[in-house]
Amino acid sequence: MRTNVFRLGDEIAAAIEAQTPVVAMESTIYSAFGLPDPANREALARCEAAIRAAGAVPAMTAVIDGVSVVGVASGNETERVLAGTTKIAARDLGHAHATGLDIGVTTVSASVTLAARAGVAVFATGGIGGVHRDVAQTGDISHDLLAIARHRVVTVSAGAKAFLDLGRTLEEFETLGVPVVGWNTDRFPAFYTRDSGHPVTMTVQTGAEVASILAANRELGHPGGVLVANPLPEADELDAVRIDAAIADALADAERQGARGPGVTPAVLGAIAAATEGDSVPANLALAESNARVAAEIAVAVADV
Ligand code: PSU
Ligand code: MN
């Protein structure tokens, strides 16, 4: 039996020891599942710089040689992760270990699980998974939602991908008992656009407010995490009509390709990038960086509580 199931990167272990704020990051969006090369590298560099500039340490999660890692080292280890071709959700972590998987890129559900295991309270992503529009036929609901509900970690996201059923995604969060907190907004963002038309459950302006929600939930014994919904910067917003048309085409495309299960999200993201002639990519980079910055501000506040 392999003994090493989990490890912290050296810098993260030292940061946790010194009580320096840490922000966990997923790795699926920085792989070919999320963004084309070299946009993936640029996204990672911008997110890490934003986190450091705000006074926190970035900790990307991944599976490396069968070990679940929080804090992938820069250089060769990061290169291997960016080139990863196996998508790992929370339920896959055990199997990845048992088989000694060389590289696995972690989704939101896996990253939140590993952040909780590491004692890291804040996690930044681009957009979470959610309830798919064809859920009545497929039953497709991302495990991201249950993982966020299960672990006491703050997830910062630009809403959920616009190709999902956002109304039903929000209903699911209500069912699961997850507060959906708007960062300087009372509307749930739709990833490429700032307003999905759906309200959030509450609005906050500061990291301290989020830290206070987390602390209160802990004190009250309310389990699970908080979703912070951060709209992408106004300057990077895409035209809603254009993106809706691209999404409709992308969903039809993914269906034609016969994408199923974990293959659906990457197929649809690729088709949206093609349909918008790449305009979705800078928007994706800008929102990931903005989420990283907000997550770091929250992590700094959490460390202060
Ligand atoms: N949104 C993006 N890019 C991504 C993802 C979401 O813009 O790469 C990834 C995230 O890792 C998320 C996952 O956790 O897709 C959800 O996959 P699924 O729908 O199979 O649960
Ligand atoms: Mn799914």
Image: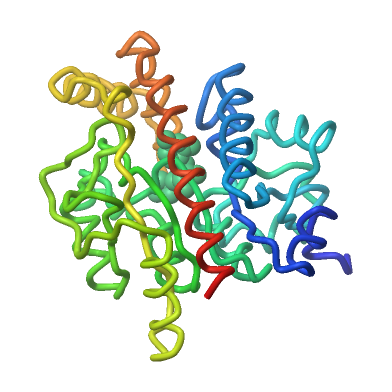
Query: What residue do we see at 42% from left, 20% from top?
Result: 282
Query: What residue do we see at 36% from left, 56% from top?
Result: 228
Residue 197: image quadrant is top left
184 displayed left or right of 152: left
x, y percent for residue 68: 73, 57
- Please tell me which residue lies in front, 188 or 110: 188
Residue 211: image quadrant is bottom left
Quarter of the figure that contains the N terminus: bottom right
Query: What residue do we see at 79% from left, 65% from top?
Result: 5
- Please tell me which residue lies in front, 188 or 209: 209
Query: What residue do we see at 68% from left, 44% from top?
Result: 104
Q: Is residue 160 above or below residue 236?
A: below
252 displayed left or right of 197: right
x, y percent for residue 251: 27, 28
x, y percent for residue 134: 21, 44
Q: Is residue 119 above or below residue 29?
A: below
x, y percent for residue 154: 46, 63
The answer to whether residue 262 is visible is no
The answer to whether residue 154 is visible is yes
Identify the colour scheme used.
Answer: rainbow
252 displayed left or right of 297: left
